Image (spheres, rainbow, N blue to C red):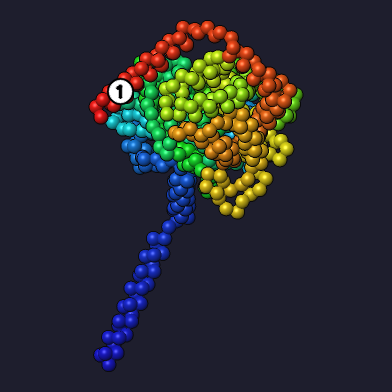
Amino acid sequence: MEEKKFDLNSIIGFTLIFGIIIWMFYLNQPTPEEIEAEKAKQEQLEKEKKADTKTETTTDFVTESEAIVANPQDSVALASAKSQLGAFAYSASLPSASDTFTTIENELLRLKVNNRGGYISEALLKQFKRYDSVPVYLIKDGKNASFNINFGTTGNRILNTKDLFFEPTVTKNGENTVLSMRLKVSETKFLEYRYELKPNEYMLDFTIRSQGLQQVFNSSQSINLDWKLQAARQAKSAAYENRYTEIIYEYDGDKDDYVGQGEFAEEEEENVSWIAFKQHFFTSVLLTDTPFKTASFESKNIAGNTEEADKDIKVTREFAASVPLDLKGGELNYAMNWYYGPTDYKILNSYDRNLDEIVPLGWGIFGIINKYLFIPFFGFLSGFLPYGIAIIVMTIIVRIILSPVTYKSYLSQAKMKVLRPEITEINEKYKDNAMKKQQETMALYSKAGVNPMSGCLPALMQIPVFYALFNFFPSAFQLRQKSFLWASDLSSYDTIAQLPFEIPFYGDHISLFPILASVAIFIYMTMTTGQTMQTQQPGMPNMKFIMYLSPLMMLFFFNNYASGLSLYYFISNLITIGIMLVIKNVIIDEDKIHAKIQENKKKPKKKGRFQQKMKELMEQAEQQQKQQQKQKTKKK
């Protein structure tokens, strides 16, 4: 009975304890107001978590500092922001402290500026398409560009503007759109990026200035501006586009230079007034009215220079520029410009800022010929002719102008051909005496009135024109995406067949214009080499080998080059062949040339001072050679 009583008492005790617990839960359950407060707190935490996630995925340039919590709503968050940002914690408390964008645009450009960092996170060129019909973005979603000012504060903090929130304000200045981005310490103290975009312009005004930050900036620490850009692929051939993608800059007023195109290149320069991250046909340029005292540049090759895996390449190069900024009276104040637009000589030259040097037209005389002759002339022709026809017409006119030079060169070759039997006879007669053979050959040239160098000089005179055109066609923005015959884009290679495999140094396609140009070069070299071909001399290059090698190199080299350039070479050599045939069969009579040479031999030839001096030197050399031979004979 006692055991049963204990069990019953236990049950009653447990029941009472359970009831008391239930009663306590009932008394301590949250009120409806407390439930709503807790729900609001959870929603706020979720928003902050999403904001952090978005911040991590909106840029490919990872920040070194911790992400700054936007819109601190309570004392703990505000204290944390002040601990990290000091005076700039005010900017994180404003409604603009979020990853939102402000858009400004005109007829040519659309620019998006992110509140975080205050820099351009998207640059769209409205009037152009990529090779695959996608719009041309020089900057897309902030993923391939970064613009940052790194500075120290009097609170011993190192801050980066790319991590901080700017407050945007859009106004109008006449027809111009003005966007002010302010990183605030208070309503009257701030760091400002000011963008002013004019109608129908690729160039916009850009100002960096501070107000009331003398006591915020730590003047003993350097302030550095860092600009980075990944050059997004825009052309059909990434490897070909990459050959013309580089950093170019101006220094010391009007001098310009470029950073190398290796796998990784770096350089440093003083008094830099503009920096261009240049792609083949599009360019991003930062200009300053107050030259940077120093600037360092880095260029990393991503795409390489071959066609391998060309279809998978999305970025050709990575660029970086770093410049120190100077305080004046404790404040920053730099008047600058941004250019986002085509690498078009006409447009760049119109700004009168030496930006035309961005277009690779060749150095020295070659660039002068392009700037003052070929660019205006081609612009005139393409104003009323299709671009392919304009290339052909310009090539014909150039070859006609150079035809007198071609005539002189061919005439010299014809004279050498007439003298070939006598030169062969001299070579056989004095084959064991090189000095005497040289003397007799020069004497023959002098009597016949033939100058062996007269055939080389006309060819040398044509080199500046040919090399200038070699630079002109790949740089002519007008040819971009202009079709002619089977070529869909004269600024890129033409394709008549796609190969299922890759041929080293050639590519995975067959271009017809390089084939035609190679055939024309082979015919031209056959005509010119056959005209002057002599017996192969020991140690001299094999002309027949060169005759076959040159067209082959042309075929491989130009298969991935602009079809407009191959079209020019094809037409140029075709016209040259025609001119040479006319000269050979109509103008030049070899019998008359031979008779003229024989007549010149009979005439007494007065030697000039140079010829007399050369004769004396050769005779002295011959005498010395004979004496040396005698001494060797005596010793034996």
- The quadrant of the picture occupied by the C terminus is top left
- Residue 82 place in picture, x, y as percent: 35, 35
Residue, disc 1: 630
Q: Residue at x 58, y 16 (%)?
A: 448
- Residue 18 place in picture, x, y as percent: 36, 73
In terms of depth relative to the viewer, which is nearer, 399 or 32?
Answer: 399
- Residue 581 place in picture, x, y as percent: 70, 27
Does residue 325 appear in the picture of this structure? no
- Residue 119 place in picture, x, y as percent: 49, 32
Tell which residue pokes out farthest to the bottom in this image.
Answer: 1
In terms of depth relative to the viewer, which is nearer, 411 or 461?
Answer: 411
Q: Which quadrant would residue 183 be assigned to in this image?
A: top left
The answer to whether residue 14 is above or below residue 173 is below
Q: Residue at x 36, y 17 (%)?
A: 623
Q: Which quadrant would residue 297 be assigned to in this image?
A: top left
Q: Is residue 156 left or right of residue 379?
A: left
Does residue 421 appear in the picture of this structure? yes
In terms of depth relative to the viewer, which is nearer, 118 or 474?
Answer: 474
Task: Count numbered badges in the picture.
Answer: 1
Q: Amino acid at mark 1?
A: Lys
Q: Is residue 159 left or right of residue 509?
A: left
- The quadrant of the picture occupied by the N terminus is bottom left
Q: Residue at x 46, y 55 (%)?
A: 35
In terms of depth relative to the viewer, which is nearer, 276 or 287?
Answer: 276
Q: Which quadrant would residue 273 be assigned to in this image?
A: top left
Q: Residue at x 51, y 43 (%)?
A: 306
Helix, strand or loop for disc 1: helix
Q: Residues within 10 Å of mark 1 (few under 14, many from 20)?
A: few
